[in-house]
Image (spheres, rainbow, N blue to C red):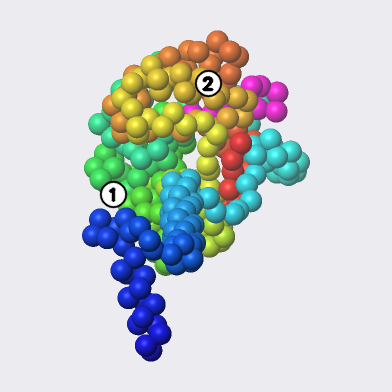
Amino acid sequence: MLDSTKNAFSTSNAFGVSGRRRRGAGSPARSAWGGTARRAGRRAVARRAGTLLTVALSLVLATTGCTRYDTTAPSAARAAADPDHPAPLGAVDCRKAKCIALTFDAGPSANSPRLLDILKEKHVHATFFLLGKKHIARYPDLVKRMAAEGHEVASHTWDHRILTRIRPDEVRAELTRPDTAIEKLTGRKPTLMRPPQGRTNKTVNDICRQLGLAEVLWSVTAKDYLTTDSDLIRKRVLDQAGRDGIILLHDIYRGTVPAVPGIIDALKARGYVFVTVPQLLAPGDAEPGTVYKP
């Protein structure tokens, strides 16, 4: 005990008030103390770096929804079609044509009537992944109009809850409520859904399979939730577009709908044909529990 006290006292008195080392203090003491301090400092830096890396990875996972699951490309769905029971091709055979699907999330909204007018003028059918709360319930006539004008009406859940974060019974409720509302308005139960933020996992896949729903992700996003610049939205879509692509847009944002005519005209000029997601998969069917992504 006395030795420990003496060593501590000697070390503390080797410094002046300013913290500088006093002249005459022995170099061995300085070397031992300094080495210990440096090692402790390096360990602290390493701990902070590890913490920052963990936080960064958590943010990446939170923003990208990185969860392991299998996906099926539209071309693979077409190739796997049952030759004895093919899905209807409609006016376009995407095995031969350069197809692309235009999809809109989180509506209907006050912007949807203008969007539907544009799609009608351009002779384009889209796929709408609709939200229940404050959307389907608020704009029932727009849901009916979407279906009546030949668009595919699908689900984007009821409350936009992240499905991978909630209990299985809550996932089921998030999916059944909008489907019931859409079927009541259109006479047809949806066969497609899009998970909020694209986050899904095996539990969500299994519940979708039980409910008769296929999951649809995307290959093109303009991140229109971050900008109101319609020209930028158009450019981002055109830069990413490719055959069998699925374009993700949101008609709830004011910069999006004004960008749509330019997107349609430019892609048509490149030889693309706009189709709904079921048409993109035909003659394959959208299999429940399968996640489709170009």
**In front of the other: 47 or 26:** 26
Compared to 156, does 245 lie above or below? above
Quick one: label 2 or label 1, which is nearer the N terminus? 1
Query: Residue at 25% across / 45% down in the picture?
Result: 134
- As drawn, is 279 to the left or to the right of 37? right
Compared to 2, does 10 lie above or below? above
Query: Residue at 32% across / 52% down in the picture?
Result: 159
- Can see residue 225? yes
Q: In the orientation shown, which residue stands out farthest toward the right?
A: 83
**In front of the other: 132 or 37:** 37
Residue 12 position within the rendered picture, expressed as x and y whole percent measured from the top left: 32, 69
Residue 7 location, quadrant: bottom left
Nearer to us: label 2 or label 1? 2
* Quadrant containing the C terminus in the rendered view: top right
Residue 100 location, quadrant: top right
Q: In the orientation shown, which residue stands out farthest toward the bottom?
A: 1
Q: What amino acid type is highlighted by mark number 1?
A: Lys
Residue 27 position within the rendered picture, expressed as x and y whole percent measured from the top left: 46, 62
Residue 244 position within the rendered picture, expressed as x and y whole percent measured from the top left: 61, 29
> Residue 90 in magenta?
no
Q: In 3D space, how far apart are the residues under numbered discs 2 and 1 (Cα atoms)? A: 33 Å
**In front of the other: 236 or 72:** 236
Instruction: Identify residue for label 1.
Output: 133
Residue 58 position within the rendered picture, expressed as x and y whole percent measured from the top left: 45, 54
Q: What amino acid type is highlighted by mark number 2?
A: Asp
* Quadrant containing the N terminus in the rendered view: bottom left
Instruction: Identify residue for label 2.
Output: 239
Q: Residues within 10 Å of mark 1 (few under 14, many from 20)?
A: some
> Residue 101 in magenta?
yes
- Chain part drawn in magenta: 94-103
Q: Secondary structure at mark 2?
A: helix
Q: Are marks 2 and 1 in contact (CB under 8 Å)?
A: no
